[in-house]
Image (spheres, grey):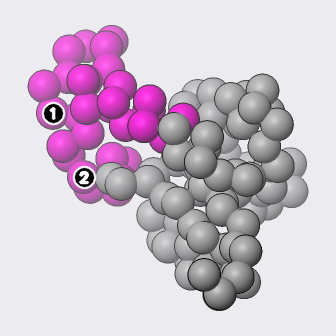
Amino acid sequence: MVGNYPVVTLCGSTRFKDEFMEAQKRLTLEGNIVISVGLFGHSGDREVWENMDEGTLTKTKKMLDDMHKHKIDMADSIFVINVGGYIGDSTRSEIEYAKAHGKIIEYLEKT
């Protein structure tokens, strides 16, 4: 291993795919290992929403939400993609989870 690289998990609404990609690139070039989402459900990855009953989450969405908490566990910090100050319910839950586990929390835009 060449260096000791901090690990950052990206959090935020998947509607901000372009901002996720830009943050991933910038944080990587700054010397971080970046963990991101696997699917962009609000930006066209329909697999997240298939077989969804009204008012309930799909098995896939539940799995992805749980998986993202594990990604936070692996990180030293989270970086919240909060374009226009937007933070949805899933992201809010991830922020609270990160706080409860002593993670550093940074934001794209000041809150």
* Residue 64 magenta: yes
Secondary structure of residue under mark 2: loop
Residue at the spot of label 2: 45
Give the camera-side residue of 65 and 14.
65
Three-letter code for the amino acid on which mark 2 is drawn: Asp
- Residue 110 locus on image (x, y percent): 86, 56
Residue drawn at 36 percent across, 54 percent down: 38
Residue drawn at 25 percent across, 13 percent down: 54
Residue drawn at 65 percent across, 52 percent down: 75
| Disc nearer the start of the sequence (2/1) | 2
User: In the rendered view, does 20 fall on the left or right side of 23?
Assistant: left
Q: Quadrant of the N terminus?
A: bottom right
Q: Quadrant of residue 87?
A: top right
Whether residue 19 is visible: no
- Residue 66 locus on image (x, y percent): 44, 30
Give the camera-side residue of 31 and 89.
31
Outermost residue toward the front?
1
Q: Residue 50 carries which label?
A: 1
- The local crowd at label 2, few if under 14, some if 14 to 19, many if 20 or more residues have their Cα within 10 Å, is few
Residue drawn at 78 percent across, 43 percent down: 103
Three-letter code for the amino acid on which mark 1 is drawn: Glu
Give the camera-side residue of 48 and 43.
48
Query: From which residue to which does the magenta span run?
Result: 40-69
Inter-mark Cα distance, 2 to 1:
10 Å
